[in-house]
Image (cartoon, rainbow, N blue to C red):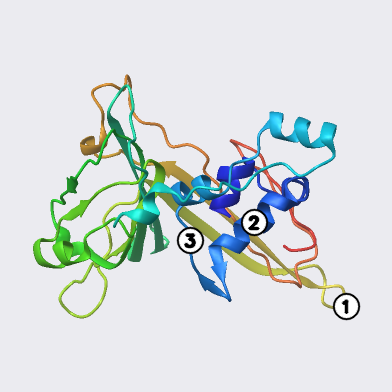
Amino acid sequence: ADTFVIYFGDPADESAVKDNFSTAYQLLEEMVDYGWPLTTEPNALTDLIRPPTVMAKIHQAMTGGSSNILSEALPNGTVSNMPWRKAGVTHPNNEIYIDIVEEIDAIVSSSGGVISSDVSGSIQAQSNLSGVPDLILTFNDATLIDDSSFHPCVRYARFEKDKVISFVPPDGPFELMRYRLRLDNGEGHNKPVGSMPIQVIPRISYGKFGSSEKGNSGMAGRISLSVTARSISSLIYSSSRKGPLVIEDVAVVIPFPKFVRTANLNATVGRIIYDEAGK
């Protein structure tokens, strides 16, 4: 899916695949060999199969022939020990951007405290470096990293020995690693991550309503959620950013049982979407 996004743009949906069927077919031919992954690096694929362009589509429509999407030359990475990186890469500005994306799954008590939690994350990078750069990424406490997987450019033996990530990055966007955090409290159980950036306090009431003599009695429930933002650690503040960090795109999902007939929903901030079919 990521390869299709690089070639066809976002979103790489059904219509994009139909419009570029020949390119998608050639990509699958190069990426999979009898069901086994073969060539999956975008830098090598773009050397083998040219990404579709507007001029190529116009030429194909005017001549009625096939657009020459296959390259006759081997990619530069196939003749070196670094198939993920092209040879002779140059950029006017040497820079690399690193984004750490983490997801926290937590069980929160009714008072807003964290009972247990699990943290998983990934390191996304955008490399615009010339030549063959050799980089090292260090951690403040590498012992917390558990269940990790790396891009092929990472020297895994170096990480196992020194707990540092030594790598020659590909050119362009790539995912450097995925990981989980080991939060052991010494008793074999995960300890909470601390205070969450968002505090959720639920209030639930449940009881009967109507008259049981007429046979139309039922059960009614009321759920009230109070969602507030907590102060964020100053460690993630940037000197180049003006003002405090703001929590954005907060979504609260409340699943209802199938026997719930109706629901009256309202919110003081934002909007509400009620899925009658899926609940």
Indicate the position of residue 252 as horizontal and vertical percent values.
56, 51
Tag 2: amino acid: Gln
Q: Residue at x 82, y 71 (%)?
A: 211
Q: Residue at x 18, y 80 (%)?
A: 187
Q: Choose between 257 and 19: the one closer to the eye.
A: 19
Question: Which residue position holds label 1?
Answer: 215
Circles 2 and 1 in contact, beta carbons < 8 Å: no
Number of numbered callouts drawn: 3
Q: Residue at x 49, y 66 (%)?
A: 38
What label sits on residue 39 in the rendered view? 3
**Which residue matches tag 2?**
26
Give the CA separation, mark 2 to mark 3: 12 Å
N-terminal of the pair, mark 2 or mark 3, is: 2
Depicted 248 relative to depicted 263: above or below:
above
Kindly state the secondary structure of the residue where label 2 is placed: helix
Describe the element under mark 3 as helix, strand or loop: loop
The N terminus is located in which quarter? bottom right
State left or right for residue 133 relative to residue 173.
left
The Cα–Cα distance between marks 1 and 3, rounded to whole angstroms, is 68 Å
Q: Position of residue 269 (x, y in %)?
A: 58, 35
Q: Which mark is residue 267?
A: none
Q: Assign a secondary structure to mark 1.
A: loop
